[in-house]
Image (spheres, grey):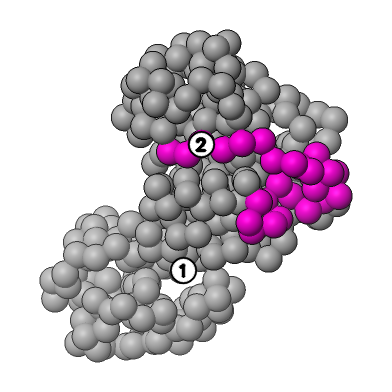
Amino acid sequence: MTDDVLIATRDPALADEVVRLAAAAGAEAIVVEETLAARQLWPSARSVLVARDLVTELAAAGPDRRPGVLVVTDRAVTDSEYRAALAVGAEQVIELSTSSHLVVEALTDAGDQAVPATTIAVIGGSGGAGASTFAAALAQTAARQLPTLLVDADPLGAGADRVLGLEEEPGVRWDDLARSVGRLSGRSLREAVPRRADLGVLTYPAGTVTPLEPGTVRRVLSAARRGHRAVIVDLPRTFTGGAEEVLAATDRVVVITVATVAGVAATVRLVARLGSGRTGIVVRGAGVDGATIGALTGLPVMAEMRDQRGLAEAVDLGAGPAHARRSVLARTAVEVLRDCGVAA
């Protein structure tokens, strides 16, 4: 597989236009005019754009099925050309005069991560368990090795950007994405959110609570997974907004429980709703021991951690909860990320 985009056409004007669109998506393009050359490069190109003038010839040649094939045209295709587009495995037929942006979006998506990010949802077993802080610590730790996005899905929290010291950074928030329409590319989202180096954050604008539609959450999470290597989601205990959409797209769920009788009792109730298939427990503080909590919840205990000194001061100074690699939160985050299959 190469990073080049294959363009098959004998039309110089159309070739120039598609090369320009490929450049806008950050891709190099190879233009071929003959079916044989197209078939030779067909399996190895990042994406394949077949122009209307060659689609029938290519369909007759019977190229192998592969993802990332588009048919581009300067006018409406005929019925026979549309059938040829289906025969070559085209995912879309795009008329450039009206929908050239779809070519850029598709090529940008093709340049995103081939393997979707590992997605980890973090939720508090009880109120005040520290789930938002631990989610931020996971994201901060993962970002030392991998492009990472922290998604704040808790509208009544302090704000993930505030916890990480990114509240002054420019970038889109949930309200911007709720107003947008259409497919969102992974790279576009990665470049649009507030970020510091490989750590990005998507949260709510200060002072507002934007209800999240499930469709918006689904679209954003899909782009987040394509544009990053790790996606950490801070979930509310109330399961409001798009929480169900998050859980459907999540590889692992981490429940933070405080080691008190009341905290464990609340966690047991939450786990009954979550289910146990992809869920693990992180125990915070002293009290009820981890083995007992694991037995009561029926979940594996991923880590046990004591409270971290100086945490409030670190967050207030904008350093984030896991700024010190040997801190309690940072070391626990490494342990949990490795359990989830994320290098840290």
Question: Of residues 216 and 276, which is closer to you in this image?
Answer: 276
Q: Where 66 falls versus 3 (above or below)?
A: above
Residue at image point 36% right, 81% down? 2
**324 over 158 or under it: above or below:** below
Magenta region, residue range:
302-327
Q: Secondary structure at mark 1?
A: loop
Lateral position of residue 182 relative to residue 79, left or right:
right
Which picture quadrant has residue 41? bottom left
Quarter of the picture containing the N terminus is bottom left
Q: Position of residue 292 (x, y in %)?
A: 41, 20
Q: Is residue 271 visible?
A: yes
Name the amino acid, label 1. Gly
Q: Secondary structure at mark 2?
A: strand
Which residue bears the numbered disc 1? 111
Q: Is residue 42 magenta?
A: no
- What's the residue type where badge 2 is placed? Glu
As drawn, is 292 to the left or to the right of 314? left
Q: CA gap, disc 1 to disc 2?
A: 39 Å
Residue 319 counted in the magenta span = yes
